Image (tube, helix red, strand yellow):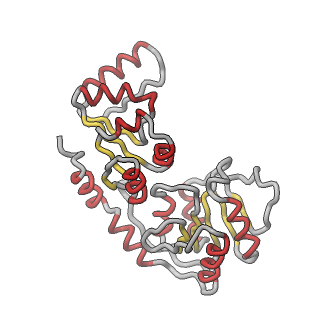
Amino acid sequence: EIVTLQNNKSTLFNSLDFIFKFFRCKMIYRIGGINIKESFFFKNAILLGKKVVIHWIGTDVLIASKKYSEGHKINERCINLAGSELLQKELNQIGIKSFVIPIVPTDFSFSALNAPDKHAILSYVPKNREAFYNMPLIKTLANRFPDVMFHIVSNDGENDLQPVSNIKYHGNLNSDEMYSLYKECSILFRFPEHDGLSMMLLEALGYGKTVVYCYDFPYVQTPKSRTEEDVIKTFENILKTPPTANKLAVDYINSEFSMDKQIQRYKNAGILNF
């Protein structure tokens, strides 16, 4: 049985319900690193012999690496999971050992989409986080390749004071709208300041898209550096040939992130053994 430990409302009923569930459970699974405000709760969970599992996903690792607090020291007494090999390496640098287990849906499987007739580029740039997701570099690319359309999701463009004609903002899209946009685009460009294991990265590869990514990852194209020059060179090489389906990437995603492999990863970490 899985119960949700949540105590957002300070009513007597919710507090008692929280305490009851806390003493009843055998394992606490937390997505995201522990901060110092929560350290008392997790210390007591460990003292009571409960299995505490912390699943690191991205920015939490970045924060931990910049400020190693009491909360992060508690993580050393937990089972730590990293959402990607990159996060595992970063956690290791601050003394936290972890198992790599991606967070993916249970029905995570794909078929390659037909390549579009012409190149178009898709990027995820949430509103008010344009700097973190490198929107200035996207605008540089759009100006450098004026005949290529750039599609930006999770952003309505209100913060763009100098619009570029070949950049289209889509705002927040539902799954059907995203699927239609994947059909239209040939390339995913993902170049944030820091990343965990992006679901959009996996989706794009699963649909057979070419992916330009700032980190090494199977079946993506990674520029030699983060400089504009190297990123532009990467795009020049891609755009000089017509779009094609990245079929090896589809096979990799379907194999590497299958439910059987996910279950085995959790078993190897000792999480499914009570």
Residue sitting at the far top: 12
Can residue 236 be seen here?
yes
Picture quadrant where residue 31 is located: top left
Can residue 1 be seen here?
no
Q: Residue at x 73, y 68 (%)?
A: 140
Judge from the rendering whether residue 104 lies leftward or rightward of residue 22; answer left or right.
right
Q: Quadrant of the C terminus?
A: top left
Q: Position of residue 207 (x, y in %)?
A: 48, 70
Nearest the viewer among 235 and 43 is 43
Judge from the rendering whether residue 58 lies leftward or rightward of residue 134; answer left or right.
left
Q: Position of residue 54 (x, y in %)?
A: 35, 42
Picture quadrant where residue 184 is located: bottom right
Residue sitting at the far left: 274
Q: Position of residue 48 (x, y in %)?
A: 23, 26
Count of all numbered marks drawn on residues in the image: 0
Q: Quadrant of the N terminus?
A: top left
Nearest the viewer among 19 and 135 is 135
Residue sitting at the far right: 162
Q: Is residue 245 above or below residue 70?
A: below
Q: Residue at x 37, y 45 (%)?
A: 55
